[in-house]
Amino acid sequence: MSASKKIRATARTLLKLSLEDGQLSEAKVRDVLAWFEQKPPAQAGATLREYHRLVVRESNRSRARIEFAGALPSGAIPSILAELSKIYGRPVSAVTSENPDLIAGVRISIGDDVYERSIAIELETLAAASA
């Protein structure tokens, strides 16, 4: 097994140790990092970078970035999170931000998936259709 394959395999093992009931656990990540500090594996820097990349990716799988233009109706965010949790089969948290470029509507990014319903995207679609 090449060094890079060993690094990826070690990082994947560390990630598995960081999960509790299939979810990333902050306490487990701390435990893994404490173990890592006491007994660093071969090529510790590269292994730690790969582990960090995997932790960030895993964290982003359950964090929705919700962008909106203007005010959202009361209860919209909890409703969106409940629906996303149902779709993805895991609890989903949110980071929200206002984005006036959307003109009106909402854009939701979770992992590599993007859901958008906004006036801006409708105008882009119309422009592309008429070109």
Image (tube, grey):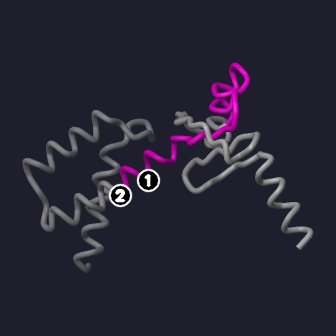
Disc number for residue 29: none
- Which residue is tagged 1? 57
Q: Are marks 1 and 2 in contact (CB under 8 Å)?
A: yes
Give the x, y percent position of residue 43.
15, 67
Position of the N terminus, as image quadrant, is bottom left
Give the x, y percent position of residue 19.
37, 42
Give the x, y percent position of residue 2.
25, 80
Q: Is residue 69 left or right of residue 63?
A: right
Q: Amino acid at mark 2?
A: Arg
What residue is rendered at 37% in x and 56% in y? 54
Q: Amino acid at mark 1?
A: Arg
Query: Mark 1 packing: few (<14 Cα in 10 Å), some, or many (20+)?
Result: few
Give the vertical position of 80 relative to 75 (above or below): below
Q: Is residue 126 left or right of residue 24?
A: right
Q: Secondary structure at mark 1?
A: helix
Q: Is residue 123 left or right of residue 22?
A: right
What residue is rendered at 43% in x and 36% in y? 21
Depth check: give the residue in front, 65 or 88. 65
Depth check: give the residue in front, 42 or 80. 80
Splitting the image into 4 quarters, where does residue 96 fall?
Answer: top right
Q: CA distance from mark 1 to mark 2?
A: 6 Å
Q: Residue furthest top?
A: 74
Q: Secondary structure at mark 2?
A: helix
Range of residues picked out in magenta: 54-83
Q: Residue furthest bottom?
A: 2
- Which residue is tagged 2? 53
Depth check: give the residue in front, 98 or 28. 98
Position of the C terminus, as image quadrant, is bottom right
Whether 85 is among the magenta residues is no
